Each structure stands twice: as structure tokens, then as C-alpha cells.
Amino acid sequence: MAKIEINEKKILGHINPEIQGQFSEHLGRGIYEGIFVKEDSGIPNKNGMRKDVVEALRDIHVPLLRWPGGCFADEYHWMDGIGPRENRKKMINTHWGGVLEDNSFGTHEYFELCRQLGCKTYVNGNVGSGTVQEMSEWIEYMTFDGASPMTELRKRNGSEDPWELDYFGVGNENWGCGGNMTPEYYGNLYRRYQTYCRQYHPDHPFRKIACGPSDAGAFWTKGVLETCFAKPGGDQFHGFMDLLSVHYYVLPGGWEHKGSATEFDKAMWFQTMKKTLYTEDLLKLHGDILDTYDPKKQIGISFDEWGGWYDCEPGTNPGFLYQQNTMRDALIAGTTLNIFNRHCDRVRLACLAQMVNVIQSVLLTEGEKMIKTPTYHVFHMYQYHQDADLVAADLFENEEVGTEENPVPALNASVSVKNGIYTITAANMDPDHSYPLELRFTDFQPKHASGSVVTEEMHAKNTFEEPDCVTEKALENLTLTPHGVKTTIPACAVLMIRLS
Ligand code: AHR
């Protein structure tokens, strides 16, 4: 019997809602078709945004949306995306399929989408091919309400009031698609660009995000911090950055041959699980470096690109990164979100890549049809962790499963509390065996227990023909004990229990 011992007297941190954020780039059918269909579409929409998609996203309480990229961000010139749509400059989206980008989804459309979702905003600026002035004027356009040229322009384009900008990214992956820079070069550019990202609202300042490493790129983390902090030790904290980004994708077969999204054997399954757990190693690696420079933890990690990335679906545009989503993705999501919760002292924001129709999505669309992926249902269960406090919890008698090359602990979990209600989420990476599970608190005596579970055979997925093969179901076998609850976690499952 696996056991989770919960010490409810030990609160370890606060889980920012933004940890469950989403990312949408101008990439394939992520925004166009997937979210934005324009006002005159036959697909039901409000101000151009698909009603079915917005409604589904509201049900998981998307806390934050990052836009416009990704690699696209460092090619994006925001002024091309404002004003009457018919006059907007067109461009070739060189990163993603070489298709024509008509800029019909721009700044105004983005803030309208966030308004409909009721989420926080995270705009990623262009360092790679943009100027300091361009970035500075974008901030002025979005946030200034005094008399100024950018305010006038925004008003002429139909938005009388400025918007609330919550986070601003100064470049994206500038070690690669964002300009192939060295960390020192980027660090210096960062210092300069962020200087002109003016805070026009002292009562609601946006937080600045510096481009951080990919994977285990410790040289980048050190180089940027060294350049922007001057000395390890934290005494010379300049307040240049509020967060540092980290990007990591689970690529089961590596970059060249990622592998099919739907056809995989057990060896590939466990390789995927092992690579998912590596997220925690990365947080320790970059967290330790951050601790050296910033022991007071003033800088957060913005894990603003994560997810399982496979070969795109056969017959689709390879530049569109469209892939199916199975129970394997549910396990990636459940496990990764548990890891983020447990590292909420540093991880203050994270974004799944990407929200609709691109890489590991919560929703897929085809014409007027929309389906919820297994990943969606995990986010739906995990939403109770948003804005909750992380509670100390240890797993015991956790079986080791997997292959010789890729052994993994069967279970992983996280526990939080909000308004006196405890939320426990757990994932079972074992595709073949269920496990009896006991949750035990130090003193707390729960009176009510409820929960739900997402579980199916490891290849199970939802399709446009069969949209409900994988859904969230009520967890039936919950038995209260004096200090907790007993249940069984099925094979290949992500579950959520609420206790009060
Ligand atoms: O999410 C797809 C791409 O992956 C993003 O554009 C880029 O930032 C990353 O390499």
C-alpha cells in the first residue's frame, strides 16, 4: 500500500494561479481557426473568438495567456497588428510553415481574448529583430493613459482605456531562434531593453521576464544572472528582472525523431515518463544557480514552455506542429503540475505549449468541431490548486516500475490547502497496475471526501468521431479513516481528491 503522509502544520509556499498558465503563438492553427475565426465566421463567436473554445477554457480557469510567441515573438512587429484589419501589413511566418500571416490577430484582439477568458496577460516582446523604441512604444500603447502619441493611436484604434499588462517577456529563446546570442550579450541587451519598459502604473506594475535557459543550459542561467546581477550573493539585486524563463519539452525520441503521438510501446512510455520527471532535476539545477545569486528568492522561474512534443500528425503541415494527445499526455501534465506545485517557492508562472492545436494542447479543433484532450481533463482537476498553499507531503512505499534504462517511481503527488479544503493530486505512471493508496494527516480529521480520476488504457485518446473516450470520472472508492482517506489509484491514471 502506497502512503502519502501529510503534515498539514507545515505550509511550504503559495501556489500562484499562473503556474497553470497557457501559451498561444502565431503557429499553425493555434490562434487562427483554433481560437480566432473573425466576426463573420459561420462558427459561433464573440468578437471573433470561438465561443466553444472560450467556454471550455473558462471551465479550467486559465489564469494567464502568453502571446505572441515563442520564436514568432522575435520576428513580430506589433504595429503591423493594429488599425483597420484590411490595412494591416502581411508577413511570411518564416518559423512556422512559411504561411502568410495577415496580422488580423494583434494587440487589441489579444486583450479581448484575455478579457473573455478572465485571465492575466503575458506579452512577449521582440529583442531579436526589434528595437528598444519599438518595445518601449508597445508598452506605452498598452498601458499608458496620459496624453501621448501612443495613447492617441490606441484610442484611434478603438480602445479608449489602457489594458492591464501583468507580465512582459524581454525576448524569447535568444540563445537560439531569438538571435543566437551569447548569455553575456543577451544579458547586456536585457539590461538596456528593460530600462525603457516603463511602468506607467505604480499600483499595477507589470513583471519583467528575462530569457532563461533551455533544458540544462546552466551556462545561460549563470551568464545572464552574472550580467544582470553583477555579483553572486544577492546584495546587488538591481530589480532588473522579476522572473527568469525556463523552457523544457519532453521529446520521447529526441529532437530528430520525436516519435508518434499515438503509437508507442512500453519502453517509449517509460522513456517519456523518465523525461517528464527530469523537469524536477532542471528545477533543482537552475534553482541552485538562482539561489547563489538570489538567496532571497526575489526572482521567480517562469517555466513558460513545457509539454510533450511528438512528430506531427501524418498528412498535416510539418510547420504547424499539430499532434494528438493520449493518456500519456495526461500523465505528463499531472506529473509536471505536481512538480511545479512542489517547487512553488521558485516557480511562479508556467505555460503549457500550446493551448489549442499545437504541441500538447488542451483543446483540438477541426472546422466547427472541438474536442477536449486528456490533458484538458487534468487541468480541470488541478484547478483547485490555483492560489492555494502547498502542504508538506511525503510518499512512502512507492513501487519502482519501468525498464532497466528508465526506472521510475510509480506514483507522484502534491497537496495543497485553500479555505480549509485540502486538494491532493496524484499520478500513476504504471500502465498495468493499480495501487492501494492511503492518505494520512498529522492531526486533521476529514469529514467529507470527494474526488475524480482520469484513467484509461495508455493509448486512449479523444477524436472528433469519439470525443469522450477519455474524460474525468467521479472517484468512487474513497473511504474516510480517522486521519485521512483510503482509495485505489488505477493503473495509468491521474486523480484528484478533496477533503474537508
Ligand atoms: O512552442 C514551439 C516553439 O518552441 C517556440 O516557438 C519556441 O520558443 C520553442 O523552441
Image (spheres, rainbow, N blue to C red):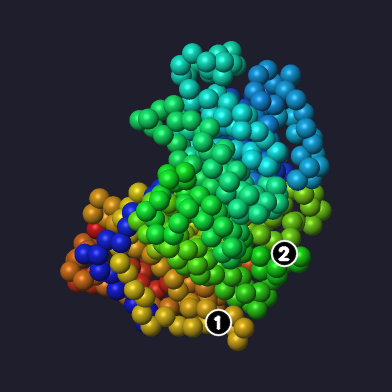
> Which quadrant would residue 72 be assigned to in this image?
top right
Q: Nearer the viewer, residue 137 or 462?
A: 137
Rendered location of residue 77, percent (x, y): 68, 31
Residue at x 78% of width, y 32% of height:
91
Rendered location of residue 370, percent (x, y): 62, 44
Q: Amino acid at mark 1?
A: Pro
**Residue 466 visible in the current orientation:** no
Q: Nearer the viewer, residue 492 or 468?
A: 492
Distance from the alpha carbon under mark 2 to that under mark 1? 22 Å
Question: SS for tag 2?
Answer: loop
Residue at x 46% of width, y 19% of height:
145
Q: Amino acid at mark 2?
A: Trp
Rendered location of residue 487, percent (x, y): 35, 72
Tell me if 7 is positioned left or right of 212 in this view.
left
| Placement of the N terminus among the 4 image quadrants | bottom left
Q: Earlier in the sequence, mark 2 or mark 1?
A: 2
Vertical side of 493 occupied by 62: above or below: above
Rendered location of residue 293, percent (x, y): 43, 59
Vertical side of 444 occupied by 77: above or below: above
Residue corresponding to mark 2: 255
**Viewer-nearest of discs 2 and 1:** 2
Question: SS for tag 1?
Answer: strand
Q: Nearer the viewer, residue 301 or 487?
A: 301
Residue corresponding to mark 1: 407
Tell me if 415 is positioned left or right of 82 in this view.
left
Residue at x 59% of width, y 70% of height:
275
Number of other residues with Cα within 10 Å of mark 1, as a class: few under 14, some 14 to 19, many 20 or more:
some
